[in-house]
Amino acid sequence: MIEVSLFLAITGLIFLGVALGVSNSISQQRNNDAVQSFAEFLRKTYSEVTNVQNATESGRSELAMYGKLIIIQDGKKIDSYSVIGKIKDIAENNTLEALIKLDANIFDYSDKDNAKLAGIPETFVPKWSSRIESIELDTPYNGALLVVRHPNSGSVFTYVMQGASMNVGNPSVGFLVNALKNGSFKIGAADYCINPDGGGDYRNRFNVRVVANARNASGVEILSPENGGNVCAK
């Protein structure tokens, strides 16, 4: 009886250890999956901007695609829009000023009676129960990332806007036009803190960073909680 009891106890402990190990492994894999998928979404955005195949958007020769606008609301709603504008030479070195002169927008006003979003908007949903947060713990991220090409040189530039509530559902709002004119977009790094369970503490958060002056997909970095440069795990 004693030997049987010992056998069952040892077997139970081994089973419990294996079960906990498997559970932790699955949890870690899900965390990595959530982080990697968001980083790849951002990298894909740069690829789409730097490798534009067609010069026009929505089939009209007077309009061209100049970039992408990503809007993150409450850390869960992430939408990507095409940025279009007129086609003409602009004697302006500043990319944002050039886009203003080209009437850059995420809406197509070619049909004045039926303005619509340019291209096909894309929505990204954080995987599993993860959430995108600001550097401050338990603070859902709100902001926008603008990745655009200079109309003449084709050079790619990255601009960031943080902490703003954005309504792009109504064409009359003119969100992008107003944000450009108001100087809301700035050049700088964007730090997205990926919380694997949508809560908890700093120690588990990954840092997906878009470096300042990012020009292509290589400007998107992933910093683990153990990385000393991770601003999300402090």
Image (cartoon, rainbow, N blue to C red):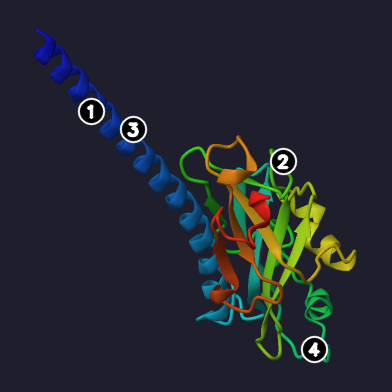
Give the label on residue 139, or none.
2
Q: In which quarter of the image is the N terminus?
A: top left
Give the label on residue 20, or none.
3
The answer to whether the residues at label 4 and label 1 have Cβ atoms under 8 Å apart is: no
Q: Earlier in the sequence, mark 2 or mark 1?
A: 1
What kind of residue is marked 1? Phe
Looking at the image, is 124 positioned above or below residue 183?
above
Q: Which of marks 4 and 1 is nearer the N terminus?
A: 1
The answer to whether the residues at label 2 and label 4 have Cβ atoms under 8 Å apart is: no
How far from the left and from the top, in percent, is residue 104? 75, 71
Q: Earlier in the sequence, mark 3 or mark 4?
A: 3
Between disc 3 and disc 4, the foreground one is 3
Q: Kindly identify which residue carries mark 4.
A: 90
Q: Kindly identify which residue carries mark 1.
A: 15
How far from the left and from the top, in percent, is residue 74? 68, 41
Between disc 4 and disc 1, the foreground one is 1
Between disc 2 and disc 4, the foreground one is 2
What kind of residue is marked 2? Thr
- Residue drawn 49% across the image and 62% down it: 40
Please say whether residue 82 is visible from this viewpoint. Answer: no
Quarter of image, res 120: bottom right
What kind of residue is marked 3? Leu
